[in-house]
Every structure is written in C-alpha cells, then in structure tokens.
Amino acid sequence: MLGETCLLCERESIAAFRLCRYHKIASERIREAYSVWQTGYGDFSWRNYLKKVISLPETGQWALDVAKLELSDLDGSEESGR
C-alpha cells in the first residue's frame, strides 16, 4: 500500500513488511546473524540475542531500532499470553 510509513521512522514502508527499505535490510541482517551467534554460543535464545544486539556499541541505529521493536513485540506477546 503506497503512502504508509515505516513502523520505526517517517520513510515510506514496503507494504508487506511495514518497514522502510533501510529497516527491512537491518531486520534481514539481524535474522541472518542470529544463526551465526547460535553456532558460536550454542543455545542462545532470540530474546538474549536481541538484548545483546541492543547492548553492543557497534550496533547501528537502524539495527538498534529493529532489535528494540522485536524485543518489544516479544514482551507484548508474552503479556497477552499470560
């Protein structure tokens, strides 16, 4: 749908993803890197991975935005399941 904005910024979103192209790329890279982290750290939960991504000073702003959104979504889904 044209004219909708990204969930995280004011840029136009890619309708199927509800993120702009920059946040979508950041989301894809975070997800791709998760498997690498699991290989390196063993049983590393998605939640712990997102917390680590957020805590790293090297994390860029777009990835930080996405990781915080993902973590917030996790927290929201757990609250609704209680």
Image (tube, grey):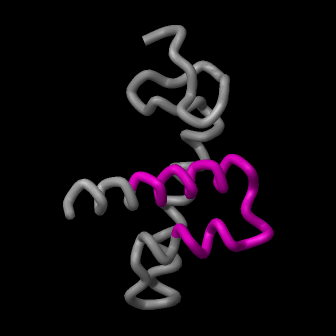
* Residue 19 image offset from top left, x and y in percent: 53, 33
Q: What secondary structure do most residues of the magenta stretch adopt?
A: helix
* Relative horizontal placement of residue 74, taking residue 72 as reference (left or right): left
**Magenta stretch, residue numbers:** 50-73
* Relative horizontal placement of residue 67, taking residue 79 as reference (left or right): right
Q: How many marks?
A: 0
Q: Is residue 38 magenta?
A: no
Q: Is residue 49 above or below residue 63?
A: below
Q: Residue furthest right?
A: 57
Q: Is residue 1 above or below residue 10?
A: above
* Residue 62 image offset from top left, x and y in percent: 68, 47
* Relative horizontal placement of residue 7, taking residue 62 as reference (left or right): left
The residue positioned 42% from the left and 71% from the top of the image is: 46
* Residue 17 image offset from top left, x and y in percent: 43, 33
The picture quadrant where one finds residue 1 is top left
Q: Quadrant of the C terminus?
A: bottom left
* Residue 9 image offset from top left, x and y in percent: 65, 31
Q: Is residue 59 magenta?
A: yes
The picture quadrant where one finds residue 5 is top right
Q: Nearer the viewer, residue 20 or 33?
A: 20
Q: Nearer the viewer, residue 8 or 75?
A: 75
The residue positioned 48% from the left and 77% from the top of the image is: 48
The residue positioned 50% from the left and 24% from the top of the image is: 14
The residue positioned 39% from the left and 27% from the top of the image is: 16
Q: Nearer the viewer, residue 43 or 48?
A: 48
Q: Residue furthest left?
A: 81
